[in-house]
Structure formats: C-alpha cells, structure tokens
C-alpha cells in the first residue's frame, strides 16, 4: 500500500472511530436487503458489547427487536427513493438489552457497490426526558381538572349559602 493511501486510511479510521455515535456500514444485497456489517466503529462495538469480528457476522436484522423488523422494508423503500432515511428503533446488545436509537441511514457507493451508512444515536436520555414531560403534562392536566371541580363545588356552596341567608332574611322581613 502506498504511503499516501496508508495515510488516508489512518485519517479515515481516526475520524470514523472518533465519532460519538455508533456507525455501521453494510451492502445492499440483490434481494434489496441489508448484508452483514462490513464496517463498524468502536462506539458500535462498545454499545452492542460485541467485538468488530463478531459484528461482521451480524446484520441489522439481528440487532433489532422482532417488532421493528417490519420497519426495515419501509426504510429500504425510502432509501431507494431518496437515498436517505431517518427512523427510531432499538438496537439489541449482546445481552438483548434494548437501546433506544435514532438511525440516520444513507446510500452510497463503497468499493464499487451500493452500500448503506447507518449512524445510530443513543436517545435514551431524550426518551427519559420525553417520558418525564408526558408524566408532568398528565399531572398538570389532572391538577387543572381537580381545580375546575373545586371551583364548581365552591360556586355551588356559595350559591347555596347566599340562597339560604337571603331566603331567611326575606322570610324575616315578610314576617315583620
């Protein structure tokens, strides 16, 4: 390998492995599916708890929960139409623990073949924040409903008191 090619590959590896997100590269097969991974970065290995060699024997279908496998068909259609797709799913690590991710996939040519570059961003913190926000909204809605009920009860009580007191006063006046 010429020195410049080696230098370019070293730069590529440094850039590829210094990303904060998991990166996967795979070819598109003849039957329009994802091949096994042909390239992964260190973040992907750490996130999924597999070595690079182990990940090269796996593909996206093995890394998604069963319920999300039907999503892949629509992702491939979108990739074929626009060249890119963004979707949320879960990646399963070695221990089958689901990691919520947002995957941004792009078609490109790699070694003369159609390939997919998938960048998976861990969105665990975002999902936790969304859950807390939803719970907070529910509590606020419940509080607003409870306040409305209290207002109605108070109005009814005040109206009853006014009616009773005014009725008594009018009765006293009438008697006099």
Image: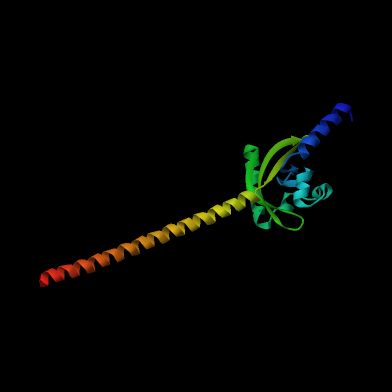
The quarter in which the C terminus is drawn is bottom left
Residue 38 in which image quadrant: top right
Q: Nearer the viewer, residue 29 or 135?
A: 135
Q: Residue furthest front?
A: 176
Image spot of residue 64 (x, y percent): 70, 53
Is residue 158 positioned above or below 121 on the image? Answer: below
Q: Is residue 51 left or right of residue 105?
A: right
Q: Nearer the viewer, residue 29 or 176?
A: 176
* Quadrant housing residue 19: top right
Most extreme residue toward the left is: 176
Q: Quadrant of residue 17?
A: top right
Which residue is painted at 74% across and 35% down in the image?
Answer: 109
* Above-or-below relation of 82 to 60: above
Q: Nearer the viewer, residue 129 or 37?
A: 129
The residue sitting at 71% across, 57% down in the picture is: 97
Quadrant of the image for the N terminus? top right
Left or right for 145, reference 16: left
Scheme of colours in the image: rainbow
In front of the other: 165 or 120: 165
Is 108 drawn above or below residue 150 in the view shown? above
Residue 55 placement (x, y as % from top left)? 80, 49
| Residue at (57% x, 54% y) in the render | 132
The location of residue 18, given as percent across then percent down, is 76, 39
| Residue 128 in the image, given as x and y percentages of width and height | 61, 53
Relative side of 4 to 90, left or right: right
Q: What is the tally of numbered marks visible in this picture?
A: 0
């Amino acid at each position: 390998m010429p020195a410049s090619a080696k230098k370019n590959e070293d730069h590529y590896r440094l850039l590829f492995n210094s990303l904060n997100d998991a990166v996967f590269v795979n070819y598109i097969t003849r039957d329009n599916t994802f091949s096994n991974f042909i390239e992964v970065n260190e973040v992907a290995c750490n996130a999924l708890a597999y070595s690079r060699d182990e990940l090269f024997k796996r593909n996206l279908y093995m890394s998604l929960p069963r319920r999300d496998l039907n999503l892949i068909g629509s992702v491939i259609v979108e990739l074929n139409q626009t060249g890119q797709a963004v979707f949320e799913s879960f990646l399963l690590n070695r221990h089958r623990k689901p990691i919520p991710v947002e995957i941004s996939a792009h078609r490109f040519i790699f070694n003369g073949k159609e390939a997919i570059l998938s960048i998976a961003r861990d969105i665990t913190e975002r999902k936790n924040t969304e859950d807390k926000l939803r719970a907070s909204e529910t509590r606020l809605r419940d509080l607003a409903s409870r306040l409305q009920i209290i207002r109605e009860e108070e109005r009814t009580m005040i109206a009853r008191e006014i009616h009773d007191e005014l009725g008594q006063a009018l009765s006293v006046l009438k008697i006099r």
